[in-house]
Image (cartoon, helix red, strand yellow):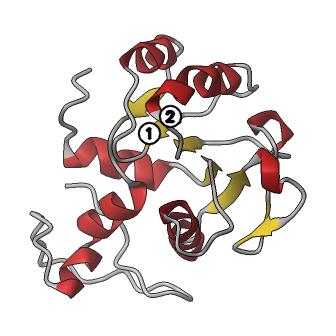
Amino acid sequence: MNHDSYSNDYIAGILNAVKTIAIVGASANDVRPSFFVTKYLIDKGYAVFPINPGHAGKEICGRMTYAKLADVPEPIDMVDIFRASAAVPPIVDEALALNPLPKVIWMQLTVRNDEAAAKAEAAGIQVVMNRCPKIEYGRLSGEIGWNGVNSRVLSSKRPLMRQGFQSFGVRAK
């Protein structure tokens, strides 16, 4: 797969299919990007499991934090990696040891490791690199346009009204 560019359908398919997300490198510091991505994804209805060995046993955004992926008490659909590119291979190895396997390995902005991506894809796992699910969700749902940012997505479809935090929902084309 070409990891320099992803179709809107590919990203929307992932964001619509996953229900549980483990965020490796989640932070309890509320000014860190991993904190507000965690909070945003929780607000969108995903079951989020922060992974941070230094914070294990405590809460981040009201969710119990785990030391490693294997400690999460339910199957993980997506592993979102907030770590340096060099730290990705052992995280992918840890994900590949899970049963069942996650559906997606997602590497945050500036995070890319082609060898680890190829290994995950060989196991049947979808991979996204150098992207943020918060940004992609906002772009594909039209929410990012509320702030005047061009999302490159136009739609005349009515918003999907949901309980709690208002959301247009991610739409596949």
Q: Residues within 10 Å of mark 1 (few under 14, many from 20)?
A: many
> Which residue has dot 1 on it?
107
User: Where the C terminus falls, by quadrant?
Assistant: bottom left
Q: Is residue 6 left or right of residue 82?
A: left
User: Where the N terminus falls, by quadrant?
Assistant: top left
Residue 3 coordinates in the image, percent (x, y): 26, 28
> Which residue has dot 2 on it?
105
Amino acid under label 1?
Answer: Met
Residue 129 coordinates in the image, percent (x, y): 35, 36
Residue 75 coordinates in the image, percent (x, y): 74, 41
Amino acid under label 2?
Answer: Ile
* Contact, mark 2 vs mark 1 (Cβ under 8 Å): yes
Residue 23's disc is none
* Residue at x 71% of width, y 55% of height: 49
Q: Is residue 95 above or below residue 12?
A: above
| Residue 62 placement: quadrant | bottom right
Q: Is residue 77 above or below residue 60?
A: above
* Residue at x 53% of width, y 49% of height: 18
Q: Residue furthest right?
A: 57
Q: Count up the numbered dots.
A: 2
The nearer-to-camera label among 2 and 1 is: 1
| Secondary structure category for the residue under label 1 | strand
Q: Is residue 86 left or right of residue 114?
A: right
* Residue at x 41% of width, y 86% of height: 161
Residue 139 coordinates in the image, percent (x, y): 25, 66
Q: Residues within 10 Å of mark 2 (few under 14, many from 20)?
A: many
Q: Nearer the viewer, residue 135 or 109?
A: 109
Q: Is residue 34 left or right of residue 4?
A: right
